[in-house]
Image (spheres, grey):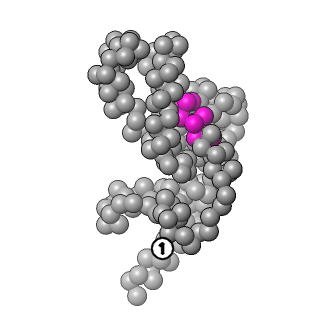
Amino acid sequence: MSIGDRFPLVLSAAADGADWAWAELYRDLSPGVLRFLTSQGAVDPEDCLGEVFVQIVRQVREFRGDEPEFRTWVFGIARSRLIDAWRREQRRPRSTDDDPHTAEWRIPHGDAADPEFLQRAAVDEILAHLGPDQRAVLLLRYLHQFSIGQVATIIGKSEGAVRVIQHRALRSLRRTLPAHRAESAREGDGACA
């Protein structure tokens, strides 16, 4: 989604503290940012999203640019907060996987009969075979429609590195997808027996 021609007015009003402008920016950006954080494995994506918007509020007066540059800037903040969350998680003591309270965040939530939920779960399962940078590049390029240059800015790498990461991720998916399809077909055959 895009704010469009009204973006300079909305951004200026947000910088001046107008609640309506912040509400519009949040409505426009939060679904995509939350999807990005969730797909990247944030342990608590909603909390991370809150941290992203706190930083945006603190730094919005310093931002200069148009709406695509603003989206790039916001996703860059999201990537930084995500990395911070990963680091915090690594410093925490590990719990056992059989503890239902610690393992709950990994359980996909949704109606198993919902085709959209099943499709998202399948995509998440396939993307789980990729590294964090590969997953980020593919999601930013194809789901969020960022250019190579914008993705490079967001993840803090050169455009050449982003192209290499994208190429390797797509090559990995080409190898993974046939195996995933075969496994799904076997599971489907077993369910019908």
Tag count: 1
The region drawn magenta spans 75-83
Residue 45 pos. (x, y %) = 48, 46
The furthest residue to the bottom: 193
In which quadrant of the rendered view does residue 164 lie?
Answer: top right
State which quarter of the image contains the C terminus: bottom left
Residue 181 visible within the image = no
Relative depth, front residue between 30 and 164:
30
Residue drawn at 49 percent across, 59 percent down: 105
Residue drawn at 56 percent across, 30 percent down: 76
The furthest residue to the left: 20
Q: Does the magenta run of residues contain 135?
A: no
Residue drawn at 56 percent across, 72 percent down: 98
Q: Does the magenta run of residues contain 78?
A: yes
Relative depth, front residue between 92 and 165:
92
Residue 108, compared with residue 27, is above or below; it is: below
> How dense is the environment of label 1, judged by Cα within 10 Å: few (below 14), some, or many (20 and up)?
few
In which quadrant of the rendered view does residue 157 lie?
Answer: top right
Residue 183, compared with residue 73, is above or below; it is: below
Residue drawn at 50 percent across, 41 percent down: 48
Q: In this view, does 193 lie to the left or right of 75?
A: left
Residue 90 visible within the image = yes
Residue 134 pos. (x, y %) = 63, 45
Residue 139, compared with residue 123, is above or below; it is: above
Q: In this view, does 85 lie to the left or right of 71?
A: right
State the SS at label 1: helix
State which quarter of the image contains the N terminus: top left
Magenta stretch, main secondary structure, is helix
Residue 6 pos. (x, y %) = 32, 15
Kind of residue indicated by mark 1: Ala
Residue under label 1: 185
